[in-house]
């Protein structure tokens, strides 16, 4: 029996999209949970300066990964009908593979220029930087391949590609830091972990890999559509891990390390929100043509109220439990007394409820371009406000600014949505979530 057939015996035989949805959510949760634990471990064993340096390096890793496949999925989806009718779908996937390689090389060059101007003193050797690029490149390759095979409805293979390389990358990165005692060794470990995954998945890759296309017309059709998505990826990065560079410029290593640590914790709320949205959004899309707008909005308001309750509850638990956990692990005590910072980070996700709500209307009504423009506008305005907060409020402005830019994004999409649909603002869900966070903050004052 071949290796691929043996491995398939251990893969779950799902019989419906609902089961695949559960599998995607479960594997994503496990993968991100392992990553969260690994990053918390790094915060406990690395010095403040080393952890800050790791955070800045990881920021480079994330932008290389994002740029490598940004916009390819959206471009391929928009072209699939045209290529499918001409029996040329395989050529489209080949062109997508070629564009991925070109974008990866472009991201290498772009980040190298950025590092050369702003960050060249962070690396003790060229090898440190090289493994960031290589680790990000091979990691994003499997993310990209998981997207491509998902378009062919090969869901088990998609789950394998998105789960195994990332999981082994986290584990190998942990082992490297644990034994080499250096934050930069994480990227060497990640690279080696993904290479091991590549070896394990070779039978599947060889069978389903479409190859490359060298037809300029096919490549041009994809490239002509991806520029806005590249810009959005850069803005999303700047509004997340990318902001660590500005924090480094304006403040010190402690503030960089604190932001990385707390931002990693806040990813729990992002994971919870994404899980809830992944369950609700398909139901919304299926019900859109079957129910009246008023009935659908009434159901949506109930969902956003529950989402506010859940996000506020999770955030409140984290705020209340943080002092106990951080005091127990003495090496994390440097991040204690961060109640206000956590409040504003978590509140940023609570006020994002309207954004998640209204974007589904744009998607179901084929207004993706309008949503993209709103993302660009709100991102630019939000980041400008974030910078002003840091300049005028100091280190507190890092977290107040994060909250405000998230709120600005939701307000902009709400006011624009009112021009198209009779949507209601999700003030009840937001109030519930903010109320729980505020009560937790008040309780911490009594500690």
Image: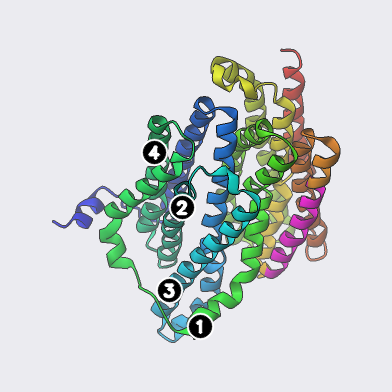
Asked if the residues shown at circle 4 and circle 3 are in contact, with their CB atoms under 8 angstroms apart, the answer is no
Q: Where is residue 441 in the image (x, y as percent from the top left)?
A: 74, 24
- Distance between the alpha carbons at the discs numbered 4 and 1: 42 Å
Q: Is residue 384 visible?
A: yes
Mark found first going from the N terminus, 1 or 2: 1
Labels 2 and 3 touching (C-beta < 8 A): no
To which residue does mark 2 refer? 130
Dominant secondary structure of the magenta stretch?
A: helix
Between discs 1 and 3, the one toward the N terminus: 1
Q: Is residue 379 found inside the magenta-colored segment of the image?
A: yes
In this rendering, would 392 be left or right of 16?
Answer: right
Q: Which element carries disc 2, helix, strand or loop?
A: helix
The secondary element bearing badge 4 is classed as: helix
Residue 303, can we see it?
Answer: no
Q: Return the residue at label 4.
A: 171
Q: Alpha carbon of mark 2 to alpha carbon of mark 3: how far?
A: 29 Å
Of the numbered discs 4 and 2, the one sitting upstream in the chain is 2
Quick one: 136 or 16, which is closer to the camera?
136
The span shown in magenta is: 369-386
Q: Name the residue under label 3.
A: 93
Where residue 282 appears, x then y in whole percent?
Answer: 56, 56
**Label 3's element?**
helix
Q: Earlier in the sequence, mark 4 or mark 3?
A: 3
Residue at 83% over, 41% down: 391
Q: Which residue is drawn at 45% across and 57% down?
A: 137
Task: Give the quadrant of the N terminus.
Answer: bottom left
Is residue 108 or residue 43 the one in the foreground? Answer: 108
Question: Residue 345 at what x, y percent from top left?
Answer: 70, 37
Query: Residues under labels 4 and 2: Cα distance?
Result: 20 Å
Residue tagged by mark 1? 82
Crowd rating for badge 3 (residues with CA inside 10 Å; few <14, some 14–19, many 20+): many
């Amino acid at each position: 029996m071949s290796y691929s057939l043996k491995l398939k015996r251990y893969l779950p035989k799902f019989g419906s999209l609902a089961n695949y949805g559960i599998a995607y959510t479960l594997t994503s949760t496990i993968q991100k949970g392992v990553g969260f634990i690994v990053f918390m471990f790094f915060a406990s064993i690395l010095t403040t300066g080393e952890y800050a340096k790791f955070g800045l390096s990881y920021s480079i890793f994330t932008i290389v990964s994002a740029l490598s496949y940004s916009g390819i999925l959206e471009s391929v989806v928009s072209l699939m009908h045209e290529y499918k009718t001409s029996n040329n779908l395989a050529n489209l996937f080949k062109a997508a593979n070629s564009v991925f390689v070109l974008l990866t090389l472009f991201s290498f060059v772009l980040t190298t220029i950025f590092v050369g101007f702003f960050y060249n003193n962070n690396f003790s050797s060229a090898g440190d930087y090289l493994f960031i690029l290589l680790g990000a490149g091979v990691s994003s390759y499997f993310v990209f391949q998981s997207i491509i095979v998902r378009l062919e409805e090969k869901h088990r293979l998609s789950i394998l590609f998105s789960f195994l390389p990332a999981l082994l990358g986290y584990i190998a990165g942990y082992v490297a830091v644990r034994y080499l005692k250096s934050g930069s060794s994480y990227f060497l470990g990640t690279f080696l972990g993904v290479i091991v995954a590549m070896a394990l998945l070779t039978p599947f890759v060889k069978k389903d890999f479409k190859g490359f296309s060298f037809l300029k017309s096919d490549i041009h059709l994809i490239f002509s559509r991806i520029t806005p998505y590249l810009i959005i990826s850069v803005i999303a990065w700047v509004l997340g891990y990318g902001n660590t560079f500005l924090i480094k410029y304006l403040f010190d290593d402690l503030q960089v390390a604190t932001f990385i640590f707390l931002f990693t914790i806040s990813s729990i709320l992002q994971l919870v929100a994404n899980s809830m949205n992944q369950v609700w959004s398909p139901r919304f899309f299926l019900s859109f043509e079957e129910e009246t707008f008023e009935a659908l909005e009434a159901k949506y308001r109930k969902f956003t109220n529950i989402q506010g309750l859940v996000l506020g509850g999770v955030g409140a638990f984290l705020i209340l439990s943080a002092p106990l956990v951080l005091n127990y692990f003495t090496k994390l005590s440097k991040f204690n007394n961060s109640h206000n910072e956590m409040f504003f980070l978590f509140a940023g996700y609570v006020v994002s409820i309207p954004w998640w709500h209204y974007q589904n209307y744009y998607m179901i009504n084929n207004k993706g371009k309008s949503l993209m423009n709103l993302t660009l506008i709100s991102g630019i305005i939000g980041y400008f406000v974030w910078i002003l907060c840091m300049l005028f409020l100091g280190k507190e402005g890092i977290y107040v600014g994060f909250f405000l830019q998230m709120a600005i994004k939701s307000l902009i999409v709400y006011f624009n949505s009112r021009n198209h649909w009779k949507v209601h603002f999700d003030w009840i869900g937001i109030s519930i979530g903010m109320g729980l966070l505020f009560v937790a903050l008040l309780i911490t004052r009594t500690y």
